[in-house]
Image (cartoon, rainbow, N blue to C red):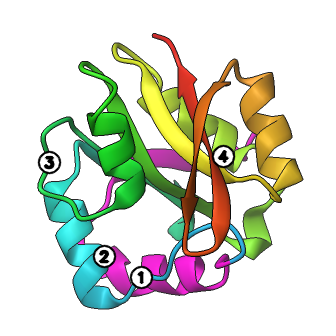
């Protein structure tokens, strides 16, 4: 199912940050925590920082980072040590009220373009793993971080 026609994918703006933090903090089973300052910094460093806006409501967001970013993340560094031309998908989160409505697919469509996309998924996140496999992502390694096994995935362009 695709979101209704009154949707637009647009860049994250400063007025979105509180909402993005709230959406992120409601999904900590699949992403790391964010506060206002770290969200603002992440957006500033990003290659792409987009929201899917449904009639003025932020339904979800995605943030990717370019190669060579100054970003302290063992997962990002893992890819930096192994890949050259790619974008790192740091996080994509869909608001609870908009799940199972095609929001994630729309956001992925917006960032899967010219370069390969690299990301990690907790090995226990079966729903996310199935979604990524259906989109053509394949596992290229794994990394233990904070007591969790991260599966390192890549989708070629």
Do tag 4 and tag 1 residues touch (Cβ < 8 Å)? no
- Extent of the magenta region: 1-28
Separation of disc 2 and disc 3 at Cα?
A: 15 Å
Q: Residues within 10 Å of mark 2 (few under 14, many from 20)?
A: some
Q: Residues within 10 Å of mark 3 (few under 14, many from 20)?
A: some
Q: Pointer 1: what residue?
A: 34
Which tag, 2 or 3, sits closer to the chain's start?
2
Q: Is residue 37 magenta?
A: no
Q: Pointer 3: what residue?
A: 69
Q: Residue at x 22, y 51 (%)?
A: 46
Instruction: Check residue 78 in the rendering and tell me which mark sits there, or answer none.
Output: none
Which tag, 1 or 2, sits closer to the chain's start?
1
- Badge 4 marks a residue whose secondary structure is helix
Q: Position of residue 77 (x, y in %)?
A: 30, 48
Single out the mark in the foreground, 2 or 3.
3
Do tag 1 and tag 2 residues touch (Cβ < 8 Å)? yes
Instruction: Check residue 39 in the rendering and tell me which mark sits there, or answer none.
Output: 2
Viewer-nearest residue: 7 or 20: 20
Q: Residue at x 34, y 27 (%)?
A: 82
Viewer-nearest residue: 108 or 45: 45
90 over 117 or under it: above or below? below
Instruction: Check residue 104 in the rendering and tell me which mark sits there, or answer none.
Output: 4
Q: Residues within 10 Å of mark 4 (few under 14, many from 20)?
A: many
Do tag 2 and tag 3 residues touch (Cβ < 8 Å)? no
Which tag, 1 or 3, sits closer to the chain's start?
1
Which tag, 4 or 1, sits closer to the chain's start?
1
Viewer-nearest residue: 64 or 98: 64
Separation of disc 1 and disc 2 at Cα?
A: 6 Å
Which tag, 2 or 4, sits closer to the chain's start?
2
Separation of disc 4 and disc 3 at Cα?
A: 24 Å
Q: Residues within 10 Å of mark 1 (few under 14, many from 20)?
A: some
């Amino acid at each position: 199912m695709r979101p209704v026609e009154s949707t637009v994918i647009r860049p994250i703006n400063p007025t979105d940050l509180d909402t993005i933090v709230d959406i992120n903090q409601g999904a900590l089973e699949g992403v790391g925590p964010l506060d206002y300052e770290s969200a603002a910094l992440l957006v500033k460093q990003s290659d792409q920082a987009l929201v899917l806006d449904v009639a003025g409501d932020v339904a979800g967001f995605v943030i990717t980072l370019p190669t060579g970013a100054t970003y302290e993340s063992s997962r990002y560094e893992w890819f930096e040590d192994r890949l050259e031309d790619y974008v790192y998908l740091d996080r994509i989160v869909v608001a609870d009220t908009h799940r199972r409505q095609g929001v994630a697919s729309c956001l992925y469509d917006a960032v899967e373009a010219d370069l390969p996309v690299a990301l990690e998924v907790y090995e226990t996140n079966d729903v996310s793993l199935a979604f990524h496999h259906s989109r053509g992502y394949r596992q290229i390694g794994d990394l233990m971080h904070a007591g969790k096994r991260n599966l390192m995935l890549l989708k070629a362009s």
